Structures are given as structure tokens and as C-alpha cells.
Amino acid sequence: MILATVAIDGRTTWGLVEGETFFDVGAALKARYADLKAAIGSAFAGVADAKSAAASVPVSKVTWLPVIPNPDKILCVGLNYETHRKETGRAEVEHPTIFSRYANSQTGHLQPIVRPRVSTDLDFEGELAVIIGKAGRYISRADAMDYVAGYSCYNDGSIRDFQRHTHQFTPGKNFPDTGAFGPWMMTPDELGALGELKLETRLNGQVVQEARIKQMIFDIPRQIEYCSTFTRLEPGDVIVSGTPGGVGARREPPLWMKPGDVVEVEVERLGVLRNVVTDET
């Protein structure tokens, strides 16, 4: 299945995406599920069957929202491709580098990524997002993929000067409307094997990042194992699994996103997340 959270005439809902059509399953199942996160927590029970009772809308008529607008946690994995680790000059580590995003830092597909008034150092980071399907603690690597509800594209937009104020990444990763998430999530059975899939970021049509998912330093089972050790993962939690080399901050001269730029993150077979950069008003 391919599922998304959208707004239709100002009303937030969620449902199934098939080609150019959105099926408003959220309205059909509103007595059962408050939102997509609740449906994930019930393993999508009844969702496929509700399609026949759901109103259909062309996707051109919806406003795309972050796939999970209200996750309990967004856990981001830093320095998780060797090309990115090397370009930052960071040492090899035994454990994943984890930082957090807040839900209100997110924006949806075709919605603006906002450059804040306090900085011009707005950088792109194309990533694969992993959406957790059920609660778990101390999850083993062997069982980890059983906890995955689906995948999405993510642009972990970063305000680099604020990120570097200290050794902690949090301020530069949480400005409003900088973390783009979408357009939709795809369930594992729909997407298939991950390893050979290409992750690509484009800025104004030019490829600026490119990698295969299999090139992660810490793979998805390891990320789930590690994160579930220090926190209990919940349905709808998001693990943003790391970005490849090529970020703007490590180029000479630096390549910052600016108003009017179009940035795209594509994961092969999964979809394309597209945003235009605007200035904060």
C-alpha cells in the first residue's frame, strides 16, 4: 500500500494513493482511526477494505502534509554513509550517531522549505525515512524488520551555523518547516528489497547527492536495535536513516539552498519529494 496524510479543502485526512488518485480512507474510517498513525498502530486493519467506501480525489487537488504529522519521536542518524563521514572529517564510531527532530519542524511534499531570517546556511540532506509499525523495546537485529510499517523520502534540511554552535546538533535541525517528509509512505511488501535502491538529491535539477541504500554504515536493523535500547519505539515513530556525501556545507564554495531553489529527494521505486525554498516572512 501507498498511504499519505493530506488536506482537502482545509480538512486534514489520510488515505491510499493509487496512481493519480487519492482515496479518502481517513473519512471512511474516522470512527475507528483518528489519523494515519493510529492506523499504523493497528497494522492497517480494515484499511484496504475501506477503499471501496472512500471518496476519491485527484492527487492534484490535495495538499500534501508530512506523512506522519504527529510522530511521538523523530530519530535521525548522523554520519551514516562513509562518503559523508569522510567529508566531515569525523572519526569512525562503533555506534550510530543519533539526534532528534521535533514534529513541528516538518513540512510536506510541494510545500515550502523555509530559510529562517537568522541564517543563510540552509543545507540539503536527502534520506530514507523508516516508519515504525509497532511498539518495541530491546528489539534484536533479527526481528527488527518486523517492526517496520513503511518507508518514505526525507530532506533533513539543516541550518548549519546553528548546528555548529556546539557539539549538539539539535538547534540546527529543528527550525520550522525545514524537514520535508513525503510525499507518502510505502509498505515494505510494496517497495521490496532496499539494498540496491538509489537515493538521490537534486538541486535545481543537478544531482548533488547519490548513493545506494546498502552503503549505509549502520543498516536499518542496527538502527532499530540501537534506538529501541535507549527508548521505546512507538507506532508512527520515524527513523531518518542518514545522508550521503555531497552536502552543501562541505563544498568549495559552500552550496546553500536559497529562495526559489527547487530541491528533490528521490528514492528509487519509492517516489520523489519536491520542495521550493522560500524565506521566512
Image (cartoon, grey):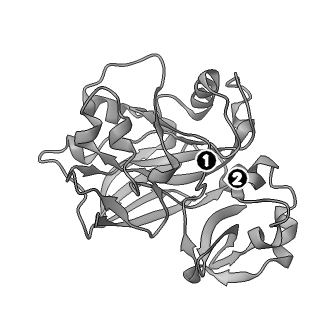
- Which of 168 and 94 lies nearest the eye of the viewer? 168
Please state the horizontal and vertical placement of residue 253, each as a whole percent of the image: 11, 48
Residue 179 at x, y percent in the picture: 43, 52
The amino acid type, in three-letter code, at marker 2 is Lys
In this rendering, the answer to whether 15 lies above or below 165 is below
Check the picture and name the quadrant holding the C terminus: bottom left
Position of 15 relative to 91 (above/below): below
Relative to 254, residue 163 above or below: above
Q: Residue furthest front?
A: 281
The residue carrying mark 1 is 71
Residue 275 is tagged as: none
Rounded to the nearest angstrom, the CA distance separating label 2 from label 1 is 7 Å
- Which sits in the foreground, 268 or 74? 74
Q: Secondary structure at mark 2?
A: helix
Q: Which amino acid, by three-letter code, is at mark 1?
A: Pro
On the rendered structure, is 75 left or right of 171?
Answer: right
Q: Residue at x 75, y 68 (%)?
A: 26
Work out which quarter of the rendered image holds the N terminus and state it.
bottom right
Identify the residue shown where x is 63% and y is 21%: 229
Kindly give the residue lying farthest to the top in the view shown.
94
Q: Is residue 152 left or right of residue 281?
A: right
Q: Residue at x 26, y 40 (%)?
A: 162
Task: Give x and y (percent) for residue 7.
Answer: 60, 73
Q: Earlier in the sequence, mark 2 or mark 1?
A: 2
- Does dot 1 land on a helix, a strand or a loop? loop
Q: Is residue 130 left or right of residue 38?
A: left
Q: Which mark is residue 37?
A: 2
